[in-house]
Image (cartoon, grey):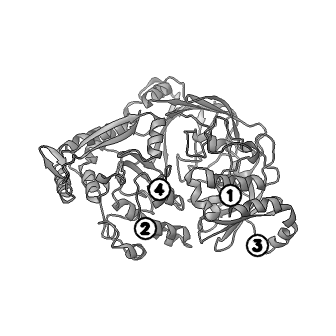
Amino acid sequence: MRSSILQAIKAATTVLALAFVGQNALAEPRHGIAMYGEPALPLDFVSLPQANPDAPKGGRITFGEAGSFDSLNPFITKGNAPAAVASLTVETLMGRSYDEPFTLYGLLAESIDTDAERSYVTFTLRDGAKFSDGNPVTVDDVLWSFQTLGEQGNPRYLTAWKKIASSEVTGPRTVKFTFTEKDREMPLLLGLRPILEKKQYDGKDFTVTSLDPPIGSGPYMVEKVDTGADITLKKNPNWWGKDLAFNKGLYNFDEIKYVYFSDPTVMFEAFKAGEIDTYRESNPAKWATNYNIPPVQSGEIVKSEIPHKRPSGIDGLVFNTRKPMFADWRVREALTQAFNFELINQTLNGGVNPRIASYFSNSELSGDVSKPATGKVADLLAPFKDQLLPGAVEGYALPVSDGTPANRAGIHKAIDLLSQAGWTVQDGVLKNAAGEPFAFEILLATGESDTIAATEIFVEALKKLGIAAKITTVDSAQYKERTDNYDFDMTHYVRSLSLSPGNEQTLYWGHAGVDKPGTRNWMGMNSPAAEALIKDMVSSTSRADFVAATQALDRVLTTGRYVIPFWYSNISRMAHKKELHYPEHIQIYGDWLGFLPDTWWYQE
């Protein structure tokens, strides 16, 4: 495959005539593509429905970010780079509309072409697409970007790269990728690959962290960097894509600045002082009490609640099952029983937030994990029945405590499960048959105040079981280094999930992540059932089959007891300066990717 890409680049000029003839046999190129069904917007759409095409341009916005950064290359495993570098300075072949589950429209590519089986995809680049240095975006840049990201980039690019059988230039602005297997998501995944300028990296090691920003084709360029402290992006006055329908009403600010804070408390004080312009409040209790401040009372600061219809995802304390003490599901269930959610939720959130019941809570992709599997879901699970943990088929629900600190029922169940797994209390200490005490470390990032508070209550409960758990907090750089290498016993785990999950699920839950550093499989799970269901998801030809496969996967993940779930919210709470505005029509994903700063604008 690798040699075929290089050969395609070199031989492009000799095959153009044949390519033009061959293109007549292809399916008709389209302006967009949906995972299922047809794109909601027609060829002549004016703007995305979640954008205001009449939004005024200009002004600036300053964000606060937790942690720090030491790199401007967000496409590799090493280093910690600001996310905005990828999303605001670099473009992809297709752009995603976050008002649909998973639909793409032409961006760098003017059209996309594939067959009914989606065994290949062809992209035709727009005439006039340019990088910020004025150089045109070429098929050479596309091929180089795909290969470099696949072979040297972050592991999140590897899954799709391995499914490309061949690549070929079929026209002066057209490139075709043929796949190794049936996978309906592949054309969309490739449409979302970042396109970098090959020339910038000539003679350079792509895998090394760098403070040289990538030369992208996006609306912004990096203007100023104070490493680890702040980064400022400035609108490119010569941005080639400013008049595209897809971009109408988007990227309205002239300047975007991100200021980094090691402590969220300090960041909130900076917001109150007017040093940053927005603040996301994840705690409903604080939302009700901490904003009784003069700028809110005077109207200088607005409190907005932004709804969404996306899945809850998973947020909680993850077990590293690579560690022998957490390899037994009964131990993981025991600690889940000891986690007094009702008490913690009342203490931190005033009891407002619902608990995450499964990875796809708050959406049709979840079904009801607490009830027995039926129909297509049961059929999909049947081949793996002997491998699945209790509850996957018959139903599983998280424990519900009485909300008191004692949590007697949960503690008693935990003791029984630990005993079954070979752990007994000896002189007040929980030990295994070899006399080794049950002790472990919970790794957390500095400044995660709510998570730290919840974990402290959990640690106290574990003492009743004779378990010694120690909380260790580290800065963002150390946290990334340790989690990339799975150097933890338990830690805080957050995975946002979309309404159209697909190949990225392999990166989250695939067996390669047991040993390969840098994946998102922090729990170290190795489940043939999960991987088979992911294949079912990406090969489904109907929405109904896709939903069934996802519901089955949800059961495998939830009953794996890999994470002790926290809570979620179906709204985002955003405090912001009154000059900042967003459209009346809220995208179905709400305050997520594609929302802030993308659709917002500044207006006195």
State how far apart marks 3 and 1 are (Cα): 19 Å
Quadrant containing the C terminus in the rendered view: top right
Foreground disc of the pair 2, 3:
2
Residue 269 on image: x %, y %: 46, 25
Foreground disc of the pair 3, 1:
3
> What residue is pinned by disc 4?
513
Residue 227 on image: x %, y %: 59, 29
Mark 2 or mark 1: which comes first in sequence?
A: 1
Tag 3 secondary structure: loop
State how far apart marks 1 and 4 are (Cα): 32 Å
Q: Is residue 414 left or right of residue 162?
A: left
Mark 2 or mark 3: which comes first in sequence?
A: 3
Mark 3 or mark 1: which comes first in sequence?
A: 3
Amino acid type of the residue that numbered disc 3 sits on in the rendered structure: Leu
> What residue is pinned by disc 1?
105
Q: In this orientation, which residue lies closer to the viewer: 283 or 306?
A: 283
Foreground disc of the pair 2, 1:
2
